[in-house]
Structures are given as structure tokens and as C-alpha cells.
Image (cartoon, rainbow, N blue to C red):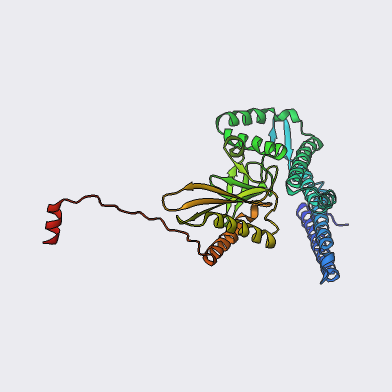
Amino acid sequence: MKNLSGNELWMNSFVVFAVVLISVIVVRGILIGTLKKWSSNKEERSRIFYMMQSIINWIALYGVVIYTLFHFRSAQWMFSALFTIGSEPVSVFLLIIAVLIISLTNRISKLFRGYVFPGVYKRYELDRGVQFTFDKAFHYLIMVLAIIISLSTVGFELSALTVFAGVIGVGIGFGMQNIASNFISGIILLFERPIKVGDRVIVDEIIGDVQRINMRATVIKTLDNEHIIVPNSYFLEEHVINRSYSDKVMRLVMPVGVAYGSDVPLVKKLLLQVAEDEAGVSPTVRQSPEPFINFKEFGDSSLNFELFVWISDPQHVIRIRSNLNFRIDAIFRENGVEIPFPQRDLHVRSVDEKIIEKWKS
């Protein structure tokens, strides 16, 4: 039997590996194509399709990685030390194993958060904030465990990380205070929950809804569909209004000015009628507590009133305010109640006669 040279052996090994890789890709394509035909025009099966597609992709990817490790198990380059940390040599094999464990754990975390936990949340009727907190806590915990297990599995002594721990400590002390502060603040936000996902908040007079609480910053979506990235430490150090903190019910104040000489009891009656009419068509407007009319003051140009209306969801503030303004304008016009514009009356007490003669000439 003819002995093969080193280059020939390497070439044959590479060809075999390429054939296996192509076979995996072809089989993956056939399976996904079959799944698409099975789930076409069947919305109830779409979730199962995406889950099965993810599982097929995972098996294909990690199957190729594991086969690569097995196929090149005798290759010298696979186990040669690339560098050392302390006294521990780090080879390509160890790096692949560590990355494989961490990557697989991340995939499993996504699988649970995407397909397992939603059913649990729906069954126990947990709000979005609790769901987000649990998802993040589960992900962080399982990833930390994966990193520790991966390092231990490849024979890496955790005590060798003391050098890096010292470097990180110096970095935090001199240049990473803000990052460390925001990271710790993010953990506090997730567990103490002064704000949570879905809350309507006001930050620097900007109204928005909390979309995500990440490790360093919180994403807030404004009413104009813009996204604000706010450092987590801001919510623990600054004054933040959370309209959804304990109770979403809030009072909406509608300022209204009418002309002097208006029928004040009629104005009160009309404003209460406006609140009642809006409550009849909008479930957001509450009947209890009852709407209230506050005669605020005698203004410079008007008698100033305030209509107090309670609403059950702060996300509807703009719509309800607009509806009430339309109703107030319409009902005042129907009943002859005047909404004045700002004006000033000038009273001239005396004028110098010389100025009058000069003006006449």
C-alpha cells in the first residue's frame, strides 16, 4: 500500500471535511424546506416552525464544530499553545471548547426566554416589568455559570484570573467609574424596580415609555417615536416622574379661561357635561373619582377654571386632552360662552397741552 506524504494526508483530510460540511448544509436546507411547506398558510404552526428551524440551525452549527474538533484531533496545530496566561497554555482546542460552551448556553437562554417563559408568564398573568426582570436575571445567571464551567472544563485555573481582576480593579478606580456605576444601577433597577419595562416616565420634561433596561443604560421611547438612551445611574440619582409606578390612574388638569361677565354656574355645568360626555365614549376616563371644577383665579384677561378628570392609563393623556379641548370649544360656542384672548386696556389720565398743539399742527 502506498504511503501518503504529509501534504497528501492534509489534502485528503481537508477534502473529507469539505464533503461533510457540504452534506450538513444540504441536509439542513432540505429539512428547513420541508418545514416551510408543512407550515405554509398555517399561522398556528409558525411558532413551532421557528423553534424547529432554530433547533436545526443549532444542530448543524454545533455538529460541524464538534466534528471539526474530532476530525482534527490529531493535528498538531489544534493543541499547540497560542499564548499562556500565568502558567496555563491556551490552545485553539481550548478556545473552541470555551466558546462552544458559552455560545451553546447563550442559545439555550434565548430558547427558554423566547419559547418556554412566555407560556409561564401568560399562565400566571405577570406584567411586562416582571417578565423583563426575570428574563434578564436568568440570562445573566446562566451566562456567568457558563463562563465559570467553560473555564473549569478546559482545565483553566480560576486563580489565574487574579491578575486580570487586579487590572480591572485599577481600571474601575481610574477610568471606569461611570461604567461600573451604571452596571450596578442597572442591577438595582431590575430588582428594586423604581422603573420597569412599559412604564410611562418623564425625564427632563420628555415623556416616554421604558422599552429596555440594559446593563449600562435604559432605552426610552418618546411619544414622537424617538429613542433616548439614559444611563442607569440617572434613575437613582435624579428626580424622575414615573406615572406608572404603583397605580396607572392619574389626574388630568384642563385649564380653561372665560371672559369676565360670563355665567359662572353655567361654565361649571358645561365643563362637567364635557367630562361626562367624554367618559361615555372613552373607557379611559373614570367616573370615580368624580370630575371636579376648580375656580382657580381672577386672571388679567379671564376668569380661570380647571377641569380635573381622572384617567386610568397615562398613555392616553394626549388623546384625552385633545378630545376634551374639542368638546369644550364646541359646547362653549353652542352656549355663547366667550374664551377671551389676552388684552390690555390703556387709560390716559392727562396729556400736556403743548404736545396736543404740536400734534395738531
- Residue in front for this viewpoint, 74 or 252: 252
Tell me which residue sits at (13%, 61%) in the image: 360
Tell me which residue sits at (12%, 57%) in the image: 357
Residue 303 image offset from top left, x and y in percent? 48, 52
Instruction: Examine the rendered structure and indicate whether residue 36 appears above or below residue 318.
Output: below
Residue 115 image offset from top left, x and y in percent? 82, 54
Residue 175 image offset from top left, x and y in percent? 55, 33
- Residue in front for this viewpoint, 261 or 232: 261
Q: Is residue 357 visible?
A: yes
Residue 52 in which image quadrant: bottom right
Residue 60 relative to residue 258: left or right: right
Residue 84 image offset from top left, x and y in percent? 69, 34
Image quadrant holding the N terminus, namely bottom right
Residue 176 in which image quadrant: top right
Tell me which residue sits at (24%, 50%) in the image: 349
Instruction: Report the number of discs.
Output: 0
Residue 268 relative to residue 350: left or right: right
Image quadrant holding the C terminus, namely bottom left
Tell me which residue sits at (82%, 46%) in the image: 74
Residue 273 in which image quadrant: bottom right
Q: Is residue 176 visible?
A: no
Question: For the view shown, which residue lies furthest in the right direction?
Answer: 1
